[in-house]
């Protein structure tokens, strides 16, 4: 049995909100049920499975959404940001600090994963004459092997070198992983171990961030930060700090608390839409609104002046930097509502608001060559099951399907219907996917489960 989860975005608690330990406990209960059901073959014979493969498909830890990156002002001696040179000793020290804080702050929930790795959580009755022997005192514990693949919020764990190996060893212990301490894979062809593991299930999987150019730069590759990282650090994570520092005594506590939810907004470019809605709901006076807008304008101006952003601006091309700059200039001349409209325009102009990656799944080489039946991505936070094709394989027809592993996350999602009305839907979500070998689950190929807590 092969399980996928992704996009937990576990943070260090300095900003954003992560899932509770109860969500992990619920997953442990569901895994027990999945393991039991997988132990039945298509003849109605019960044979307890002896192993479970669990894949954490990127953005599980989220070191990006941390105000610890902002401890030292940008440009000051010793300042480290997500786009700093990873070879700097200060970079690995900062990443180690944030990673340790994430592991510590999510200790209770991650204990579920460690219990799975220690074979303490999933317990199956033995088989007697092909049926479960519930009366037996003995219980069988399948071995659970957990493997980490990286995405765009945790790309740092893909970097090579002894200092990063040390950080990964802490993750291996903290999450109960079966990865070696070397760079965690991003694409499937980077890990022969995972390639061999996925092959019997006819599954191809990756995080999916390569299809979002706000979160992945093909020219720089995955061992590099992106414009999204700069925007998250210097605008989204910093804005609540600056507002509280300048206006904390003048604004309602409920408004200040709402700003801590900015990293949970999807998509990230919808951030000004959320702020506009919160201002209209809580901020009160026009004077307060003007002050908030000034802080936002200052931060977005500073964002455009960051060396990394300036270097990303391609000469003689209208690119993402130009679109962001134009949107920021438009928004600075009017209100947050104009910033909202400009953000929507950027999404539509450059395709950064794409909800489904099914078209990309259809073009995966493993699908085109009939090597895989199933493609799994994460990243979008939108769980999906989409039929791609029916192909001839030997003497039979086979279905090819795309799955998105959704998220385990507390977040506020911009409604598709008329986004200018600033409507966000809050909920917590949990999605997991299961794939089975031919002898498992009565020859069922897959299960996809999504839950939402509203």
Image (tube, grey):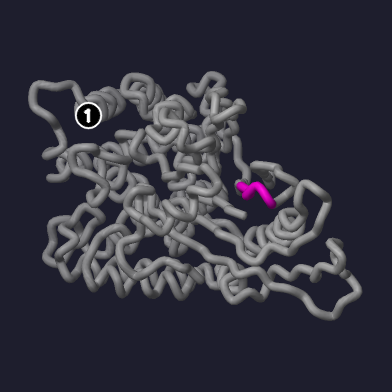
For the C terminus, give its image quadrant.
Answer: top right
User: Counting other residues with Cα less than 10 Å from the Cα at mark 1, is it few (<14), some (14-19), or many (20 or more)?
Assistant: some
Residue, disc 1:
325
Q: Which residue is at 55% across, 51% downward?
A: 4
Q: Magenta residues: mostly which secondary structure?
A: loop
Residue 396, percent from left and from top: 61, 27
Q: How many marks?
A: 1
Residue farthest to the right, as pictured: 135
Where 356 sits versus 148, above or below? Answer: above
Give the residues in magenta: 434-439
Q: Viewer-proximal residue, 68 or 93?
A: 93
Residue 324 falls in image quadrant = top left
Residue 47 within the magenta-colored segment of the rendering: no
The reply to whether residue 249 is in sight is no
Where 181 sits versus 156, above or below? Answer: below
Residue 108, percent from left and from top: 59, 71
Q: Which residue is at 56% across, 20% downward?
A: 417
Where 38 sits versus 49, above or below? Answer: above
Q: Viewer-proximal residue, 181 or 93?
A: 181
Residue 300, percent from left and from top: 26, 39
Residue 436 within the magenta-colored segment of the rendering: yes
Residue 97, percent from left and from top: 33, 71
């Amino acid at each position: 049995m092969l399980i996928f989860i992704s996009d937990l975005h576990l943070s260090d608690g300095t900003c954003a909100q992560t899932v509770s330990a109860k969500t992990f406990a619920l997953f442990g209960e569901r895994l027990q049920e999945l393991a039991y059901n997988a132990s039945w073959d298509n003849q109605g014979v019960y044979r307890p499975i002896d192993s479970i493969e669990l894949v954490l498909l990127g953005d599980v830890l989220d070191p990006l959404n941390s105000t610890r990156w902002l401890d030292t002002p940008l440009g000051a001696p010793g300042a480290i940001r997500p786009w700093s040179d990873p070879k700097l000793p200060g970079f690995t020290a900062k990443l180690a600090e944030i990673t340790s804080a994430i592991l510590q702050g999510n200790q209770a929930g991650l204990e579920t994963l460690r219990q799975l790795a220690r074979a303490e959580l999933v317990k199956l009755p033995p088989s007697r004459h092909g049926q479960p022997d519930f009366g037996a005192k003995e219980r069988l514990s399948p071995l659970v092997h957990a493997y980490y693949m990286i995405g765009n919020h945790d790309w740092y764990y893909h970097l090579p070198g002894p200092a990063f190996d040390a950080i990964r060893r802490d993750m291996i212990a903290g999450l109960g992983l079966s990865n070696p301490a070397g760079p965690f894979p991003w694409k499937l062809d980077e890990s022969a171990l995972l390639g061999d593991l996925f092959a019997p299930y006819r599954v191809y999987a990756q995080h999916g961030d390569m299809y979002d150019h706000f979160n992945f730069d093909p020219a720089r590759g995955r061992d590099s930060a992106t414009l999204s990282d700069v925007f998250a650090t210097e605008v989204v994570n910093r804005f609540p700090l600056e507002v509280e520092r300048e206006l904390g005594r003048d604004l309602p506590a409920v408004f200040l608390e709402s700003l801590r939810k900015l990293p949970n907004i999807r998509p990230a470019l919808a951030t000004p839409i959320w702020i506009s809605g919160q201002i209209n709901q809580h901020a009160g006076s026009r004077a307060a609104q003007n002050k908030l807008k000034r802080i936002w304008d200052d931060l977005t101006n500073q964002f455009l002046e960051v060396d990394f952003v300036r270097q990303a601006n391609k000469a003689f091309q209208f690119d993402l930097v130009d679109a962001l700059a134009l949107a920021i200039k438009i928004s600075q001349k009017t209100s947050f509502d104009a910033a909202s409209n400009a953000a929507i325009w950027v999404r539509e102009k450059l395709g950064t608001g794409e909800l489904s990656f099914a078209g990309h799944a259809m073009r995966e080489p493993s699908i085109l060559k009939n090597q895989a039946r199933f493609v799994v991505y994460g990243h979008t936070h939108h769980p999906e099951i989409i039929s791609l094709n029916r192909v001839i394989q030997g003497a039979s027809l086979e279905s090819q399907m795309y799955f998105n592993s959704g998220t385990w996350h507390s977040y506020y999602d911009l409604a598709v219907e008329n986004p200018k009305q600033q409507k966000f839907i809050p909920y917590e979500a949990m999605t997991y996917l299961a794939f089975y070998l031919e002898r498992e689950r009565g020859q069922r190929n897959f299960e996809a489960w999504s839950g939402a807590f509203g």
